[in-house]
Image: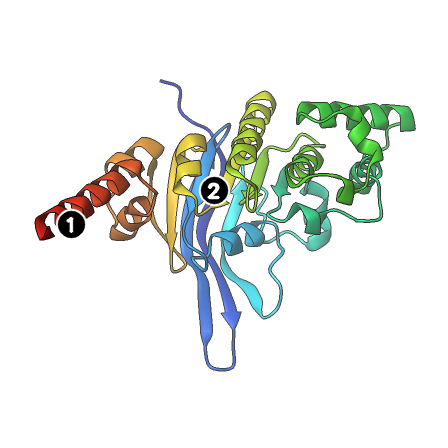
Amino acid sequence: MKKKEVLLDIENLDVHFATRRRVIRAVDGVSLKIYKGERFGLAGESGSGKTTMLLALLRMIKTPGYIAGGTAVLDDGTDLLTKSLDDFRKIRMERVTMVPQGAMNSLNPVMRIADQMILTMREHGDKSEKNIIRARVEELLVSVGLKVEIGMLYPHELSGGMKQRVCIAQAICLNPNLILADEPTSALDVVVQRQIMQTLTKLQQKLGASVLLVGHDMGLMAQFAERIGIMYQGNLVEVDTAENIFTKPQHPYTKSLISSIPSFERKDRLELQSENKVSSQN
């Protein structure tokens, strides 16, 4: 059996927020390995530290937050947490990229879609001729299931699902090795959610990239992730294959998350119990 190659090795990551009363450990000594070509899900409720961890990897923690310690080393030896911001900017999008949670907030409302994508590529060093870079934009739009004509539209002319597809296309424009997806289907209906995740999976396989998906929807994690990590109060309390997480959860919090998944079977049982109770009263 071929040994898995590590793409990103996170060791003892600490992210703190300083308040007047105390220091809050939003991410507390998290260690995690992401393998090449892997789909990894990081699950937990709001405030568990999962998105904060993602932002730390992108050096996007804002004051009063700060990275208090740890390392996040790529396969070429690059430590994402210690590089200067200027140097880090050179590898962002090219090696590590992000699909944001709020697509509307991530797109410029006064720029056409194609122009935004071209600007992103130019800002990160793509010096291709105009016709070549426009052809690349069209190729990216088609790859996420959108028509070429979408490039001439403004964000407000697109549906929520279409805007999210644009964000995915923009994120992969430089063929990154690691895609950080922060609840990319938030506020979308379940049908569009499934379509977006299918698109992300297809692109991940095509690029051979790794995906770190953050979210609280355990059903979505079950469909997408090969391995799942559970965040609770800033700690990574459990990591296992998706199958083991759902069939043999070890941590009490993991069990609670799984029990929160809606179940038709459980609903039917409750209804039957209610009916039996009414019958007995009669």
- Where residue 225 sits, quadrant-wise, is top left
Please tell me whether residue 178 is drawn above or below residue 252 in the rendered image: above
Residue 261 falls left or right of residue 275 = right
Residue 213 falls left or right of residue 273 = right
Kindly identify the residue that appears in the image at 61 percent across and 50 percent down.
58
Q: Amino acid at mark 1?
A: Val
Q: Which residue is mark 1?
A: 278
- Mark 1 element type: helix
First reached walking from the N terminus: tag 1 or tag 2: 2
* Closer to us: 258 or 130: 258
Within-10-Å neighbours for mark 2: few <14, some 14–19, many 20+: some
- Mark 2 element type: strand
Q: Residue furthest front?
A: 282
Please tell me whether residue 213 is drawn above or below residue 30 in the rendered image: above
Residue 103 rendering spot, x and y as whole percentages? 66, 45
Q: CA distance from mark 1 to mark 2?
A: 58 Å
Kindly identify the residue that appears in the image at 30 percent across and 37 percent down.
264
Q: Amino acid at mark 2?
A: Asp
Q: Residue furthest top?
A: 1
Residue 107 rendering spot, x and y as whole percentages? 74, 46
User: Which quadrant, please, contains the N terminus?
Assistant: top left
Residue 106 rendering spot, x and y as whole percentages? 70, 49
Residue 61 falls left or right of residue 261 = right
* Closer to us: 269 or 98: 269
Judge whether residue 77 can be spotted in this image: no
Residue 246 rendering spot, x and y as whole percentages? 29, 37
Within-10-Å neighbours for mark 1: few <14, some 14–19, many 20+: few
Judge whether residue 57 can be spotted in this image: yes
Q: Which residue is mark 2?
A: 9
